[in-house]
């Protein structure tokens, strides 16, 4: 019986994890897999795309499929949102990437009418104004996350939050300066396939899903002060949570 695409992908995945196929190495092409495993070309293609969708491989047009040499980003939510980080002037991103080169691109800061779902999450009236911070984060030159933050305009429009450079500690440190320090965060996650526009913005390869996260920052008295919609390249992230019972 001919092997399935998943069985072929499992074999290649083991070769990658064992080091037999090193980062940057070219994977066997579709013709080679067809000949080796006695499968249809479509089965060979699906096997390679499984590895691409898992973030283990990348396709290069006209060249082939290669083992990804980009190291995964470990996103530890508990650590990145701790006030001991942003409260001391560090970016919350420092807990994700350490010393790896990080760049913010496509940054736009503007005032607009809150989308209906955001207005509900912030406890605002329909159509209320919010300050929007829209940007893309690139690690080692590779776009890995798009994020859009929404904050009540009446609260932040005259602060550094409405400027491109928010200063040390970022948005949460500036909220603390305004006496509305976030002390609790709620994140809702789901995985889905991206739109064509989202794929283009994050330079995603075919069949690569995204993780969509809505995070709400909440003050001591229970007031929501920020909603952040993040779109992560699922192929480069490991999500880690520490839960105390």
Image (cartoon, helix red, strand yellow):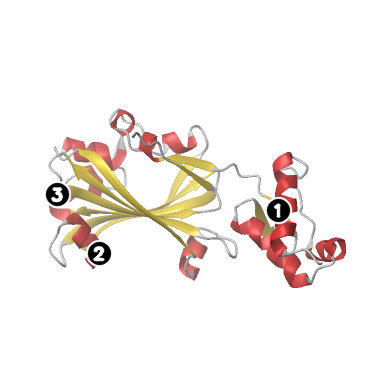
Against 241, is 234 above or below?
below
Apparent side of residue 74 relative to residue 31 in the rendered image (left or right): left
Residue at x-position 69% and y-position 66%: 46
Q: What element does badge 2 sit on?
A: helix
Q: Is residue 115 visible?
A: no
Closer mark to the observer between disc 2 and disc 3: 2
Across and down, in percent, residue 222 comes to 15, 45
Mark positioned earlier in the residue sequence (2 or 3) = 2
Q: What element does badge 1 sit on?
A: helix
Give 6 or 129, whichever is nearer the viewer. Answer: 6
Q: To which residue does mark 1 refer?
A: 10
Q: To which residue does mark 3 refer?
A: 155
Residue at x-position 38% and y-position 34%: 79
Q: To which residue does mark 2 refer?
A: 117
Callout 2 crowding tier (Cα within 10 Å): few <14, some 14–19, many ≥20:
few
Callout 1 crowding tier (Cα within 10 Å): few <14, some 14–19, many ≥20:
some
Tell me the quadrant of the picture where the N terminus can be found.
bottom right
Mark positioned earlier in the residue sequence (1 or 2) = 1
Q: What element does badge 3 sit on?
A: helix
């Amino acid at each position: 019986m001919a092997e399935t695409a998943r069985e072929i992908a499992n074999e290649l995945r083991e070769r990658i994890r064992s080091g037999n196929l090193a980062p940057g190495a070219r994977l066997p092409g579709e013709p080679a897999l067809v000949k080796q495993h006695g499968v249809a070309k479509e089965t060979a293609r699906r096997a390679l795309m499984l590895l691409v969708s898992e973030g283990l491989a990348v396709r290069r047009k006209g060249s082939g499929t290669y083992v990804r040499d980009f190291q995964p980003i470990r996103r530890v939510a508990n650590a990145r949102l701790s006030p001991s980080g942003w409260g001391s002037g560090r970016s919350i991103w420092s807990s994700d990437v350490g010393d790896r080169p990080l760049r913010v691109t496509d940054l736009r800061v503007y005032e607009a009418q809150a989308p209906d779902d955001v207005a509900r999450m912030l406890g605002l009236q329909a159509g209320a104004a919010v300050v929007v911070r829209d940007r893309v984060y690139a690690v080692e030159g590779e776009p890995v996350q798009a994020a859009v933050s929404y904050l009540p305009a009446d609260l932040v429009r005259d602060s550094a939050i409405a400027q491109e450079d928010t200063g040390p500690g970022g948005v949460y440190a500036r909220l603390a300066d305004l006496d509305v320090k976030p002390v609790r965060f709620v994140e809702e996650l789901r995985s889905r396939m991206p739109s064509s526009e989202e794929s283009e913005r994050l330079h995603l390869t075919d069949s690569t899903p995204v993780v969509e996260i809505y995070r709400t920052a909440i003050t001591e008295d229970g007031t929501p002060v920020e909603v952040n919609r993040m779109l992560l390249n699922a192929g480069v992230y490991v999500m880690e949570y520490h839960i105390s019972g």
